[in-house]
Image: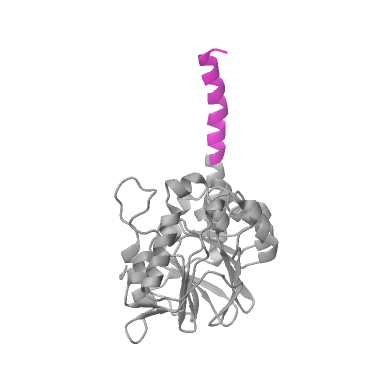
């Protein structure tokens, strides 16, 4: 076969494929907009405070930073991407100052300090734990306990160890915690009572058969429950890492899903969503970067509207005492 004929065949294959993906994306966006009416966020600055039991999904672009709030207590799950990601080849601005400013606005106590019952890193990718260095070192932030399971290089890909320097990231966090005498718990509990929330933690250890699946397979997922309402914070849990298959039936239904892996390939598979069946999905990313198949699975299969934290400058999910989840957005824009 000559090169000209090969190019024509490739063109006939690639062009329809790209057109199909484009159409798929449009269909899912339209479906998502129709579904979104039930949970459409209202601006936080104009809305009343619906509850003292809230999950704050900060806008740190395509990185995770989640502040739990319940009955005057605060805890931080992941920290967003900092300013020194080993994966970045050029200088860039991370989210350290934004996260610190948010904590000192939303979680400040009467003594002027931020009090966190605990901090938890779901796994050691820098876009999840990169800001912990600055948070831990800040003397205006009081941390009662830190949950970080031991880094297991046997689960990582070689490039994650050599180029992404996950071991160095882990060592820095542990060193910072010791320097501030913050109690460190590495045997992660499966249950935590936090204010009015009951937290159930999944994948607190390591599955032997997921070695070499990559650091995403180390991700800790958290189910947050108040009364009849629940949310699942999926960290970077994906089908490709093997975790969705292992955890889906154990997690069960959740009203709100913080979708795994920022909506990238391998997250929110149909086989996983048949167990979760979320009414609404929040993705730490902009919707335009979410993979079309993930949008399809959420909007067309699960019939779940999805919201990107980037699109709304962060989102707060309030769990009300009368059994509702209310979303607000544009959170503390003036301060951050």
Residue 228 locus on image (x, y percent): 64, 76
Image quadrant where residue 302 sits: bottom right
Q: Main secondary structure of the magenta part?
A: helix
Q: Could you tell me which residue is drawn at 62 percent across and 79 percent down?
A: 227
Q: Could you tell me which residue is drawn at 32 percent across and 77 percent down?
A: 140
Depicted 45 relative to depicted 1: above or below: below
- Which quarter of the rendered picture does the C terminus lie within? bottom left
State whether residue 63 appears in this view: no
Q: Nearer the viewer, residue 61 or 251?
A: 251
Q: Could you tell me which residue is drawn at 45 percent across and 78 percent down?
A: 74
Residue 135 locus on image (x, y percent): 36, 69
Q: Is residue 132 left or right of residue 211?
A: left
Q: Is residue 79 left or right of residue 195?
A: left
Depicted 34 relative to depicted 20: above or below: below
Q: Which segment is the magenta one?
A: 1-21
Magenta residue check for 11? yes
């Amino acid at each position: 076969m000559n090169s000209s004929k090969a190019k024509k065949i490739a063109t006939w294959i690639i062009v329809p494929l790209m057109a199909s993906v484009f159409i798929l994306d449009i269909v899912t966006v339209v479906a998502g907009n129709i579904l979104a009416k039930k949970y459409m966020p209202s601006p936080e600055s104009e809305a009343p405070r619906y509850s003292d039991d809230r999950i704050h999904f900060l806008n740190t672009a395509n990185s995770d930073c989640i502040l739990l709030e319940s009955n005057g207590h605060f805890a931080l799950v992941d920290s967003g991407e900092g300013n020194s990601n080993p994966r970045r080849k050029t200088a860039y601005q991370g989210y350290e100052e934004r996260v610190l400013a948010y904590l000192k606005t939303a979680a400040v106590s009467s003594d002027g300090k931020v009090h966190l019952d605990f901090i938890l890193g779901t796994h050691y990718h820098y876009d999840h734990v990169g800001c912990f260095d600055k948070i831990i070192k800040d003397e205006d932030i009081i941390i009662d306990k830190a949950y970080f399971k031991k880094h297991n290089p046997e689960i990582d890909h070689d490039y994650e160890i050599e180029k992404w320097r996950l071991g160095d990231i882990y060592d820095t966090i542990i060193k910072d915690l010791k320097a501030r005498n913050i109690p460190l718990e590495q045997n992660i509990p499966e249950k935590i009572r936090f204010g009015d929330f009951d937290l159930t933690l999944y994948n607190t250890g390591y599955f032997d058969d997921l070695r070499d699946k990559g650091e995403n397979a180390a991700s800790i997922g958290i189910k947050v429950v108040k009364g009849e309402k629940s949310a699942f914070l999926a960290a970077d849990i994906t089908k490709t890492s093997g975790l969705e298959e292992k955890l889906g039936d154990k997690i069960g239904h959740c009203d709100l899903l913080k979708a795994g892996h920022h909506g990238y390939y391998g997250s929110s598979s149909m086989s996983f969503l048949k167990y979760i069946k979320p009414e609404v999905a929040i993705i730490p990313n902009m919707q335009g970067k979410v993979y079309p198949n993930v949008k399809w699975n959420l909007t067309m299969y699960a019939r779940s509207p999805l919201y990107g934290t980037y699109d709304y400058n962060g989102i707060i999910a309030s769990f009300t005492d009368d059994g509702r989840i209310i979303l607000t957005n544009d959170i503390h824009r003036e301060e951050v």
